[in-house]
Amino acid sequence: MNKAVGLIEARGFTAAISALDAAAKAAEITLIGFEKIIGVDEAMGVNIQIAGEVAAVRAAVDAGVEAGNRVGKIISSHVIPKPHEDVDELIKRFAKNLKPKKRKAAAKTKTVAKKPSGGKKTSSGKKKIDDEKAPVGKETTDEKINKEE
């Protein structure tokens, strides 16, 4: 691999996005992955992995660190110039985070069975409908969402 790998670890999502935005604007790099990490500096951390030519990655990481520190906190950063071939396997693993996940097939719409009324009469003589009874023939909110997808 004749490229470099750059890593920026930020505390919080805002600092991470700011760092990535600045890095991408500073040089021609490719986002190869990201990881959400729980417990970094007693908060949620985000590790951003970028790749590109050595000089581009160095410039991008420097710009990202500076921008991330303006809005939050960058925990650490590092550039690995011309990483070992085995690092390609790790990069492929990182890249899996960027691939869209396959959506599960939408569930079939179910109709709620009609229940006997069983309502109770109030003192005014009107029927009171029990809260536990589902409306007849109505779809639940989840079923409507799945149907629309």
Image (tube, rainbow, N blue to C red):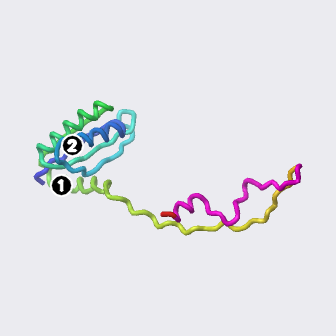
Give percent across and percent down for residue 27: 17, 44
Q: Indicate which disc residue 86 carries.
A: 1
Q: Establish if 82 lies above or below 149.
A: above
Q: Quadrant of residue 74?
A: top left
Closer to the observer: label 2 or label 1? 2
The foreground one among 42 and 32 is: 32
Q: Secondary structure at mark 2?
A: helix
The kind of residue on which mark 2 rests is: Lys
Q: Establish if 88 lies above or below 76.
A: below
Give percent across and percent down for residue 16: 31, 40
The kind of residue on which mark 1 rests is: Asp
Q: Please tell me which residue is depicted at 30% across the width and 43% down the height of the picture.
A: 47
Q: Secondary structure at mark 1?
A: loop
Q: Please tell me which residue is depicted at 51% across the width and 63% down the height of the picture.
A: 148
Q: Quick check: 102 left or right of 82? A: right
- Give the main secondary structure of the magenta stretch: loop
The foreground one among 87 and 19 is: 19
Q: Quadrant of residue 65?
A: top left
Give percent across and percent down for residue 10: 31, 37
Q: Quadrant of residue 13?
A: top left
Say if mark 2 contacts mark 1, CB within 8 Å: no
Asked if the stretch drawn in magenta spans residue 100, the answer is no
Alpha-carbon span between mark 2 and mark 1? 29 Å
Give percent across and percent down for residue 94: 28, 53
Instruction: Give the magenta part as a residue range.
Output: 123-147
Instruction: Tell me the quarter of the image containing the N terminus.
Output: bottom left
Q: Indicate which disc residue 123 carries.
A: none
Q: Residues within 10 Å of mark 1 (few under 14, many from 20)?
A: few
Q: Please tell me which residue is depicted at 16% across the width and 49% down the height of the picture.
A: 52
Q: Which residue is mark 2?
A: 25
Q: Which of the two labelled residues, at mark 2 and mark 1, occupies the earlier sequence position?
A: 2
